[in-house]
Amino acid sequence: MISKVNTVTGPIAVNQLGKTLMHEHFVFGYPGFAGDATFGPFDKSQALAIGVAAAQRAKLHGVQTIVDATPNDSGRQPELLKEISLQSGVNIICATGYYYEGEGAPAYFKFRNLLGHAEKEIYEMLLREVTEGIGASGIRAGVIKLASSKDCITDYEQLFFKAAARVQRETGVVIITHTQAGTMGCEQAELLISAGADPGKIMIGHMCGNTDIQYQVRVLEKGVYIGFDRFGLQGLGDSPKDIFREALTVALLALGYEDRLLFSHDTVNLLLGRPVEMPPQMAAIFADAHIGRIFETIIPDLKRMGATDSQLDKIMIRNPQRLFS
């Protein structure tokens, strides 16, 4: 049994995780952002200040650990995360992995797949970053991040799922996922489990994008954890409003699934590349997308709807510990 988890400042015991947010992004960049460096150069001091402020805001609500789910092809910055952790006093767990095909950077490993090497090389990359460190930083990833497309897991995406399951079999590392619009949760779980992954070490993410309770139960019956990890991101495309996510949470608690739920926001505290100027309508949509949303709004709402302190402590503290144990 693994009793420690890799953070950006080194391994810690799972009982030191405390209150945990399972899916946030201190920085994130859509692949291609680096090519716009003339107008959007990376300002490390700005990124550090914004990251420390976000971590400290979470810390005011008792958060001790944040999982940064930024994949390798989307601007992951392990050394920056280490500085944010040291300055804020919040544990940060860094990811290894790639984003889904539609918004990721598929060309590199698609080319290598033509040579017949991709799945092996992805396995080697994930394993090295979990066991030895990312590049020359010495910072080891504490989770593998996977992602799939809406209504399908493409052949390209399956390469990562299969390689990740192999790494998990060998190391016990936790796997967290991105589901596009809350679809393919069952299929993600089935693919990973069929490849030998432990369902008790898997969080199927963004499940709050789908408010069909029967679908939620079908995924939970696979033995995995599910992430309600987009609180505050509401009204964007077909994204449900938080009130429906809250109602779904209470329904799942009533059905006895309090041991399998995990919370977060999927905040992007700094979008890499050229600064974004949002029109007023878009700015209004993102007004609630901040790292305090769960504590300032969602948990008080859930308590009014009947959720108990014990259930909420399980979701925020004990379930993350069990996932990483």
Image (cartoon, rainbow, N blue to C red):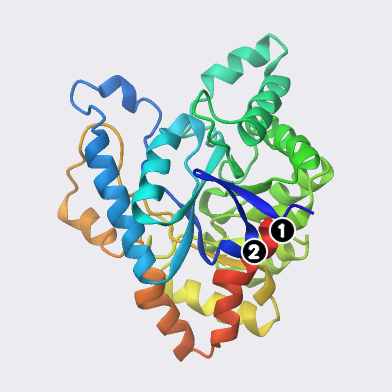
Where residue 296 appears, as percent x and y from the top left, is: 35, 76
**Tag 2: residue type?**
Gln
Quadrant the N terminus occupies = bottom right
Where residue 165 appears, as percent x and y from the top left, is: 75, 39
- SS of the residue under disc 1: loop
Identify which residue, 276 or 4, lies in the foreground.
4
Q: Are marks 1 and 2 in contact (CB under 8 Å)?
A: yes
Return the residue at label 2: 321
Determine whether, in the image, residue 284 is placed left or right of residue 113.
left
Residue 245 to residue 307: above or below: above
Residue 147 to residue 129: above or below: below
Return the residue at label 1: 325
**Tag 1: residue type?**
Ser
Identify which residue, 43 or 161, lies in the foreground.
43
Q: Residue at x 54, y 17 (%)?
A: 108
* Residue 76 visible in the picture: no
Q: Residue at x 58, y 31 (%)?
A: 133
- How far apart are the two marked residues, 1 and 2, measured between alpha carbons? 6 Å
Identify which residue, 287 or 201, lies in the foreground.
201
Marker disc for residue 209: none
Determine whether, in the image, residue 135 is placed left or right of residue 220.
left
